[in-house]
Image: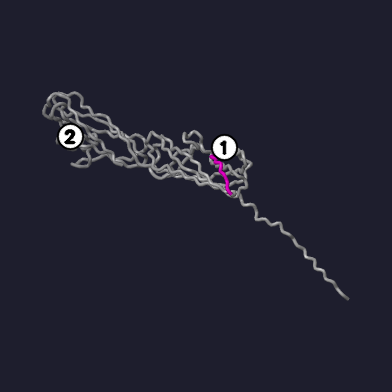
Amino acid sequence: MNRIVFVLMLLLAGLWHGGAIAQSCSLSATLNFGTINPLSSVPAQGQSTATFNCTGFATPYVRVCANLGDDQTPREMVGPTSARLHYELYQDATRTTIWGSAWHGNPPLYVDIPLSGGAGTAQKSFYGTVFTGQTNAPAGSYTVTITSTILLGYGYTTTPPVCSTSGQTSWQSFQVSTTAMVASDCTISGTNIDFGQQGFLQSAVTSTGVITATCTKGSAYTLALSAGSGAGATVASRLMTRSGGSDTLAYGLYRDSGRTQVWGDGTGGSGTVSNTGTGTPQTATVYATLPVQPPPRPGSYIDTITVTVTF
């Protein structure tokens, strides 16, 4: 008996495909304000560049919309002892359009990228401002990284789509980091000390003045007084000089109301006044004495003291 064997080969032509290249976009953005002065009346401003990269698109163009998902206004950097520094990020150099999100009230930062082989890159400037009036910010480093963010890519051929919460072909997350260094600083001012109009100096005459210092919160500072402009004067023996002449009147400046602690620069037995800044004006009283001395020649007597703040 003959047998014919027929082999039936079943071939499954697999529908192979390498899978469409995943559409993906990324963004890197960091803004460093550098060193800023919280006592300044001028806002600190910064500028940086966001770099966009996209791959895997079949369209000739892609619009990438960078949504900063936080809705806090103003934004905050965190510094020493959890101190906050208010700032904001903007899309324009005039700082009128906040960099926001399609999910919130301010628009996202976007860029249109021409693609070659499905890939492309582009850069977009963005801007920042640290607001004034934050004198209570202590010196130190401040930073924040915004992580609640969504990067949307919309592939298109002719007309770029509007950034929205739907219709995108690519959806990724990204981060934006912001840093600043708050520097220690002080500003000082003072009032004049006036002994008034005097005749014979048969008893000591006293007066006071005030030095006002505004220093960065937490910054230690020291106030020193010079010997003055009188010829031969020292911090322990100051001299006022008659206008238009060379006659002098001795007087003293002190740190205490008892007028026993000479206020100078630390030399000649004198001391200085030290304090720690609060970010608000702090005052120090200068106690002055015009002691008993031989009758001076009539005229106007004056001296100029230089106040130095070290911090």
- Visible residue check, residue 24: no
Which residue is rendered at x = 61% and y = 48% of the image?
57
- In this view, the residue in front, 44 or 161, is 161
The quarter of the picture where residue 296 lies is: top left
Q: Could you tell me which quadrant the C terminus lies in?
A: top left
* Image side of residue 301 versus residue 42, left or right: left
Evaluate whether residue 50 shows in this view.
yes
Residue 230 as seen in the image, left or right of residue 121:
left
Residue at (25% x, 38% y) in the render: 224
Secondary structure, mark 2, is strand
**Residue shown at the point (25%, 36%) measured from the top left:** 307
Q: Position of residue 68 (x, y in %)?
A: 54, 41
Q: Which mark is residue 104?
A: 1
Q: Which residues are magenta?
A: 108-116
Q: For mark 1, give the secondary structure.
A: loop
Q: Is residue 299 above or below residue 39?
A: above
**CA gap, disc 2 and disc 1:** 66 Å
The residue carrying mark 2 is 238
The question of residue 174 being in magenta is answered with: no
Position of 168 with respect to 218 (left or right) is right
